[in-house]
Image: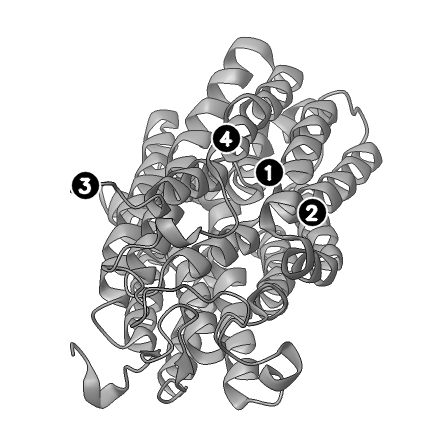
């Protein structure tokens, strides 16, 4: 019999490319590189520019309840495609804004149209296509976002150096429209057909596939579980702390080491570490108890931020970049895995959408507070110590979540999803 590769890995490729040009690396992370050129061109301070990121995330947050419901109702792809196209066009148009108010207005528009291009839709597709190797699939797909974090700073700087701010925004928009949208349109499929399911991933004892009733709890039922609110609280802190560092990372490095090339190198290392970290953590999620892996990830991030807070000279900022990058590359995957294992995939779009909204609350507030802290102290040290403390607190919360419930697999009714408990690690 001729070997036929599982089409699910093409879904991983589509999700990886889509997340490489998603709002996180393209719209949010690019602000860190744009910060000084914007300040030099228009005279805005870092707190005012940081508020752009807050406006972006608040706008995405406002849309997430609708996005999660739409994903469950009409399917991820029908949400993704219009969002990708609108995202690319809106970002390209932002280069024509000339006042701070106009920039704020454009980022409201970007946040509204790009909300469906976030990781929620991709995680929903991956949770449907994979069960036994879900952690690896999510990690591999999310590595694409790490590639985006690695390449977007240098790409943005190249555009600025050769064409200025307007060309930078046009180039970022073109990247979404010419790379992300075509790949997602061509490769992504919401659900597998019966003949696309291999025994190595899903198997039904009678050889049939049942997708009509997905396993897990409803969003309303999840909200009555203590793990739901613990997850929201922990990842609000984690996402806020990590994205605050991502937004201010290049500036923080330049305050320690003014050499321009070293700050861009550190930003690239952060992205590369995020990429490799997603793959490594994805492997660990399938082998170990996920909350323990997540706590270790958060501890790495806290250690990296502490290295920056101590203002150690080169090459220590590069070590900090590797540790922070590992955390920034895997915290979203940890949330996706924990949501699927604690709550199942029955209403995954809604549940993960709510959890993702909590991360947006942290992202909308904490990076802006970091900008205010810099303006108050004229350095990042005090704020960096506070961010490290937030990550440490989140690690303790995640460890306290307890064992996973058991839900029936959509295509393995005789098997159990999320069966690992602390006493069954490595089984």
Q: Is residue 98 left or right of residue 119?
A: right
Does label 4 or label 3 sit earlier along the sequence? 3
In the image shown, does 42 or 367 lie closer to the viewer?
Answer: 367
Give the residue displayed 36% in from the left and 50% down from the top.
Answer: 195
Q: Is residue 55 left or right of residue 141?
A: right
Residue position marked by numbered label 1 in the rendering? 27
In the image shown, does 140 or 297 lie closer to the viewer?
Answer: 140
Does label 3 or label 2 sit earlier along the sequence? 3
Residue position marked by numbered label 3 in the rendering? 3
Q: Residues within 10 Å of mark 3 (few under 14, many from 20)?
A: few
Q: Give the percent coordinates (x, y) of residue 86.
A: 71, 33
In the image shown, does 125 or 173 lie closer to the viewer?
Answer: 125
**Labels 3 and 2 touching (C-beta < 8 A):** no
Q: Give the percent coordinates (x, y) of residue 238.
A: 47, 66
Give the residue displayed 34% in from the left and 70% down from the top.
Answer: 294
Number of marks in the image? 4
**Labels 1 and 2 touching (C-beta < 8 A):** yes
- Give the numbered dot on residue 52: none
Does label 1 or label 2 sit earlier along the sequence? 1
Q: Residues within 10 Å of mark 2 (few under 14, many from 20)?
A: many
Q: Tell me the CA gap for discs 4 and 1.
A: 24 Å
Q: Tell me the CA gap for discs 4 and 2.
A: 28 Å
């Amino acid at each position: 019999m001729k070997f036929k590769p599982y089409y699910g890995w093409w879904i991983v490729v589509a999700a990886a490319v889509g997340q490489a040009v998603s709002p996180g690396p393209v719209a949010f992370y690019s602000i860190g590189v744009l910060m000084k050129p914007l300040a030099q061109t228009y005279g805005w301070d870092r707190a005012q520019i940081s508020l752009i990121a807050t406006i972006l995330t608040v706008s995405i947050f406002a849309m997430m309840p609708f996005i999660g419901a739409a994903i469950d109702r009409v399917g991820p792809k029908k949400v993704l495609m219009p969002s990708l196209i609108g995202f690319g066009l809106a970002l390209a148009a932002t280069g024509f804004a000339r006042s701070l108010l106009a920039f704020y207005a454009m980022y409201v528009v970007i946040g509204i149209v790009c909300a469906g291009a976030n990781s929620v839709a991709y995680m929903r597709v991956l949770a449907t296509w994979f069960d036994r190797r879900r952690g690896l699939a999510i990690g591999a797909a999310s590595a694409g976002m790490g590639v985006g974090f690695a390449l977007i700073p240098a790409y943005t700087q190249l555009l600025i150096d050769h064409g200025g701010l307007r060309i930078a925004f046009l180039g970022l928009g073109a990247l979404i429209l010419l790379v992300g949208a075509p790949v997602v349109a061509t490769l992504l499929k919401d659900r597998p057909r019966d003949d696309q399911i291999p025994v190595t991933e899903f198997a039904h004892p009678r050889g049939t596939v049942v997708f009509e009733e997905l396993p897990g709890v409803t969003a309303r039922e999840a909200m009555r579980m203590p793990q739901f609110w613990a997850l929201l609280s922990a990842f609000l802190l984690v996402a806020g702390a990590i994205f605050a560092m991502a937004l201010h990372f290049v500036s923080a490095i330049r305050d320690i080491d003014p050499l321009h090339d070293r700050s861009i190198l550190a930003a690239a290392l952060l992205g590369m570490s995020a990429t490799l970290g997603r793959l490594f953590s994805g492997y660990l999620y399938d082998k170990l108890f996920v909350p323990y892996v997540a706590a270790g990830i958060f501890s790495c991030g806290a250690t990296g931020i502490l290295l920056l807070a101590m203002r150690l000279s080169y090459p220590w900022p590069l070590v900090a970049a590797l540790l922070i990058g590992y955390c920034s590359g895997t915290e979203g995957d940890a949330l996706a895995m924990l949501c699927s294992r604690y709550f199942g995939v029955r209403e995954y779009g809604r549940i993960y959408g709510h959890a993702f909204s909590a991360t947006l609350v942290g992202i909308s507030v904490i990076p802006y507070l970091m900008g205010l802290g810099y303006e108050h102290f004229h350095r990042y040290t005090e704020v960096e110590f506070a961010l490290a403390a937030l990550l440490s607190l989140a690690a303790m919360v995640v460890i306290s979540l307890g064992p996973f419930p058991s839900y029936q697999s959509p295509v393995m009714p005789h098997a159990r999803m999320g069966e690992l408990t602390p006493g069954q690690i490595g089984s």
